[in-house]
Image (cartoon, rainbow, N blue to C red):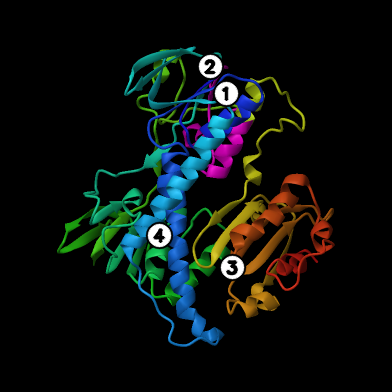
Amino acid sequence: MVILGGGPAGNSCATTAARLGAEVTLVESDTIGGAAHLWDCIPSKAMIATGNAQSFLRRSMGMGLTEVGSQVDLTLVAERLRRIEARIEGSVRSLLESQNVRMMKGVGSLVGPDRVRAETEGGVSELEADVVVLATGSRPRVPDWAEMDGRWVLSTRDCYPPEELPDHMIVIGSGVTGVEFVHLFRSMGSQVTLIVSRQQVLPQKDPEVAAALEEDFMASGVRLLKGARAISASGGADGVTVRCDDGRVIEGSHALVAIGSVPNSERLGLEAAGVHSRGGYVPVDAFLRSNVPHIYAAGDLSGRLPQSSVAAMQGRKIAQHALGMGPGRAHRYLDYDKAASAIFTEPEIADVGLAEADAFAEGRKIRVTKVPFASAPKALINDDPRGFVKIVSDPATGVVLGGSIVGRHAAELISVIAVAVSNGLTVSDIHESLLVHPTLSEALAEAAE
């Protein structure tokens, strides 16, 4: 097996396949662990943690503390990010080495359906492969209307950390990445304006969840420009100007463009191997196979859910399928509709399974129960009663179909509902579990009851 790309999909596929007896070569041009993972996901969450610490300190006077304050040192933040990245990369590399996975640092491409070309510092090698896995990830989308210079008009990868803390950051894009950066910079003390092309942030999420986030943004001083689509972004040290299609003009110190990503597929040699693509993505079947049966695609390149957790599971599923593990519990199909997701704003947002709005749109009968965290003693102990737990279930059987959580530690708490959704558990299964008191998870049991 030859794997192109060492991100969550590639390295999980490599270790699983090696344990199952395959001879595995992993070709990665950048960072073992994945550039998208270690340049996007992990640094952004680490910086959000710093911002959350700032927010907590500002709120802590309500917990009996006085004269609390701090300043963000971007140099120290950058050093912290490098330490985290090095530790994660070292951990992934050690795991691969322990499984005898051969690692090559270089650029890999297909030169035929069963041959891979690897260009490394030591020269060019051609590798024969019974199975090829394409897991080269993606990169931030850079529109032609934005004058990206990496300092004043930024992509997401220019923010870990930026050269200076913005006085006024204009965020373009109100999806998951955009709202996380709104929270990040606002929590660190920057003034923030968010350009929302539609009438709510997070247009793909439950309107009630989006409304809760909007309310918190506005309470913290974030300016929302709804129904506006950016058509230009330019500037420099004297200021940045963003123009919208409705004539509105916003001026700030910096602008961040967060409008999605594009797959890294240009240099893969897909045509040489006869692999079909669509918009740069490689369409796959239920087993993650491309139109060439022994060539698989995973992670962002597959065009499925762009989440690290999903990519890692795809990698494991590919290894199992390629090594002959057939359908059954050992190799269940991936059901993307049951994948949990989280947004690391403050409060956090997490959801899984069937959404209330989607069920109503389909005319499906559901039961929706909602409990505010304000009813949980632990939320009062934390002096943070914001948010709620919402569980969607089948009214006839009680089977949990989905759920949403807004509040502190939502990304952790959603795991309970995710396990229920994935395994067909009922609300009684959650309610009758003996959970710890006092914890935020008690709100889950109350919603289930």
Residue nearest the observer in this picture, 72 or 40? 72
Residue type (three-letter) at the residue carrying disc 3? Gly
Q: Position of residue 163 (x, y in %)?
A: 26, 58
- Vertical position of residue 245 compared to residue 268: above or below: below
Q: Position of residue 322 (x, y in %)?
A: 63, 21
Label 3 residue SS = strand
Real-space CA distance between mark 4 and mark 3, rounded to the nearest whole angstrom:
18 Å
- Tell me, yes or no, whether the two marked residues, 1 and 2, touch with CB atoms within 8 Å: yes
User: In the rendered image, which residue does mark 2 sit on?
Assistant: 292
Residue nearest the observer in this picture, 392 or 314? 314
Residue range of the region highlighted in magenta in the rendering:
287-316
Residue type (three-letter) at the residue carrying disc 2? Val
Residue type (three-letter) at the residue carrying disc 4? Phe
Q: Earlier in the sequence, mark 4 or mark 1?
A: 4
Side of 368 where 317 appears, left or right:
left
Residue 172: tell me if it is visible.
Answer: no
Real-space CA distance between mark 1 and mark 2, rounded to the nearest whole angstrom:
7 Å
Side of 27 where 371 appears, left or right:
right
Q: Earlier in the sequence, mark 2 or mark 3?
A: 2
Mark linked to residue 181:
4
